[in-house]
Image: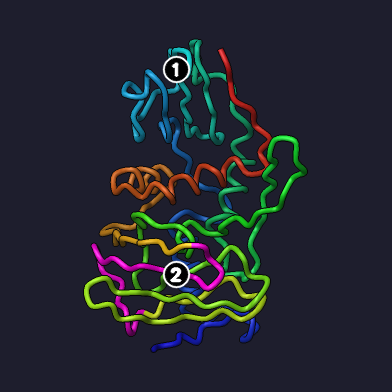
Amino acid sequence: MHLDKFDPAKSGRPLPRLAKAALGTILLFGVGSVAMAQNMVMRSTGPSASSYPAGKKMANDAKISLKAQDQVTILTKSGTRVLKGPGTFSLAKGGGSASTASRRLSSFISNRGSSRARTGAVRAAGAAAVETPHNPNLWFLDVTKGGKFCVADADALVVWRPDYTGSATASIVEPENGNVTEIAWRKGSALKAWPKDVLPVTDGASFRLLGSNVPQSVEVNFVVLQNQPTDLDDAASMLIENGCSGQLDLLVDTLNLNNGESADQG
């Protein structure tokens, strides 16, 4: 079994491979300001969902008419808005500060491979808030989540684990032949380089992942992007077009994290 020896905590500085991934992300989106999609549908549920499919672009003066049980999440240049029906909403109104959204997203996409993950408060009904780790980078592969995963740089894929309080391992299984490759994290380290020398990252490749402290295995299907996104609008469109719903959810959730923004209701 191959054990990749990537460990930022041990080295004390980001390794070139990880730095390359972070730098590439910075170049894609920029640090000081992030190009924001003016208005794009990110999620939609309810009776009117077919009228507002994910990826639909809308003008600044557009009005959205929703029925009861409808909920639409819109990405605007000032962040995200969640609209709940019934009601008619104007995209020209509402939204937060564009600079605030830009700073929040810049922090998310320019993460330099820190082994520390952000946490977000999740409050269950009648229970105290519980701190849960939040994936710090759009292009980090979460070992606990399966499905399609869009890869921006096949040579610099990083595997992230939510629980980094202790040491852990993960088995990467090749479905075609059953071969197993292991990676390992030291206590306090959340990141590990994908073992590309043994398991090249190619478009359409599938692997099953099982972490030592994860209740069940997940299957990941790689989609290697042919063209790297140039801005947020482009990135969101690529995630939608390629069915990378987990990363799209992460993108939306990151924009909303610590935003304190409530849904607009009719």
At 38% from the left and 52% from the top, the residue drawn is: 230
Q: Is residue 158 above or below residue 3?
A: above
Specify the quadrant of the image occupied by residue 61.
top left
Q: Quadrant of the N terminus?
A: bottom left
Q: Hey, what amino acid is under mark 1?
A: Asp
The image position of residue 113, as x and y in percent, is 56, 70
Q: Are marks 2 and 1 in contact (CB under 8 Å)?
A: no
Name the outermost residue toward the front: 215
Q: Say what secondary structure mark 2 lies in.
A: strand
- Tell me which segment is drawn in magenta: 196-215
Q: Residues within 10 Å of mark 2 (few under 14, many from 20)?
A: many
Could you say which is closer to the camera, residue 26 or residue 87? 87
The answer to whether residue 28 is left or right of residue 10 is left
Disc 1, SS: loop
Task: Using the image, determine if residue 192 lies above or below residue 117.
Answer: below
Between 246 and 234, the one nearer to me in the picture:
246
Question: Label 2 is placed on what type of residue?
Answer: Leu
Judged by depth in the image, the label closer to the viewer, 2 or 1, is 2
**Horizontal and vertical percent for residue 168?**
57, 77
The quadrant of the picture occupied by the C terminus is: top right
Q: Which residue is mark 2?
A: 210
**How far is mark 2 from mark 1, CA to CA?**
48 Å
Q: Which residue is mark 1?
A: 61
Name the magenta segment's main secondary structure.
loop
Q: Position of residue 63 (x, y in %)?
A: 44, 14
